[in-house]
Amino acid sequence: MSVFTSIPYGGNPAWVVMGAEGVKDEDLRNLANDLNPVSDTVFVLPETTSEADINLRFFTGTGEINFSGHASIATYFALSGENILNLKEPEVTIKQRTKSGIQLVELRVKENKITRATMTLTKPNYLDIEINPVQLSRILGISQHDLTAANLPFDIISTGFYDLIVPIKSIEIMRHLNPDYTFMNNFCIRLGIHGIIAFTQEIFETGDTAFMRHFAPVVGINEDPISGAAAGSLGCYLIRKKLIEPSNFSRIIVEQGYLQNRQGKVYVHVECSRDQIFRVKVGGNAVLTFTGYILTP
């Protein structure tokens, strides 16, 4: 599947694998590494309780991760027409179980096909850690002047994973980021975070909100073409820093993948009450690009 896009082979690739119940974890990891070593693979498993409708496990080439936003979105588009879920028009809510807990996923349905999937993320959590700009400029491969030109603070936010959010002044500076992934990996491990989000309020397409790049070498993905959870964290940053006025429903469109020839968009909904964020959702669509059968070990 190509996720967070309507363009085949755009967005973020994800393999969706059904029928893997009983397969050993090590074999799931090896399978994920063969199928998609640079991104996530989701295995759709039966749910054995009444607490959820579906059970998802996510693997990268380096091992299991607790949650993947884009692979979750991919799952529901892949399941269209499989008669696994009860799809009622115009909208149905599914409870999915992951290692991060149970998430609600809202599916727009037309003629038994899913046209948009939107999931609720965890409420934002924050880490207060002082970041050394000299070190960070070396990690991202840009000058200290370019790193601080946006005149906005760094922040560490999680709506599923903790990411360091780095504001950048322009797309041109974003284009010339040249990360040192070994240095970044060690830096993220030391801070206990998942990766680094660099973003700018300059955009490629009118009507969008921000352009983002997401780096996550800790989980074996140097640069993620598009990340739903990371876009959710960025949406919270924009609200928290008053770059977008808090409201009971703020709609944010995050561009990503435009410098990797995999352009796509994540639709982020942030709901606030008295300037406090109480709900974050991310959504998008996906395109089927490949279907077939896999022989397990």
Image (cartoon, rainbow, N blue to C red):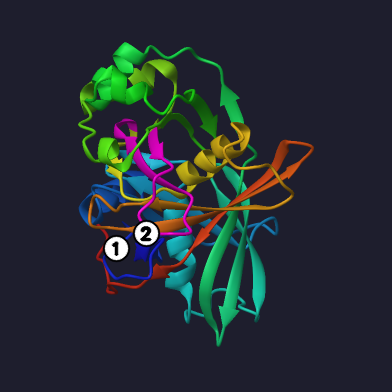
Residue 132 vs 239, above or below: the answer is above
The amino acid on which the numbered mark 2 sits, given as a three-letter code, is: Gly
Q: Is residue 206 left or right of residue 224?
A: right
Name the residue beneath numbered marker 1: 10
> Which residue is identified by label 2?
264
> Which is nearer the eye, 29 or 225?
225
Q: Residue at x 47, y 12 (%)?
A: 130
Mark 1 Cα-neighbour bin, 10 Å: few <14, some 14–19, many ≥20: many
Marks 2 and 1: CB-CB under 8 Å?
yes
Q: Position of residue 269 (x, y in %)?
A: 61, 52
Q: Residue 90: x and y, percent?
A: 65, 79
Give how far across and how far down residue 1 sits, in percent. 34, 66
Q: Is residue 118 part of the magenta span, yes or no?
A: no
Residue 22 visible? The answer is no
Asked if residue 238 lies left or right of residue 223, the reply is right
Residue lying at the far bottom of the rendered structure: 111
User: In the visual, does 20 lie left or right of 244?
Assistant: left
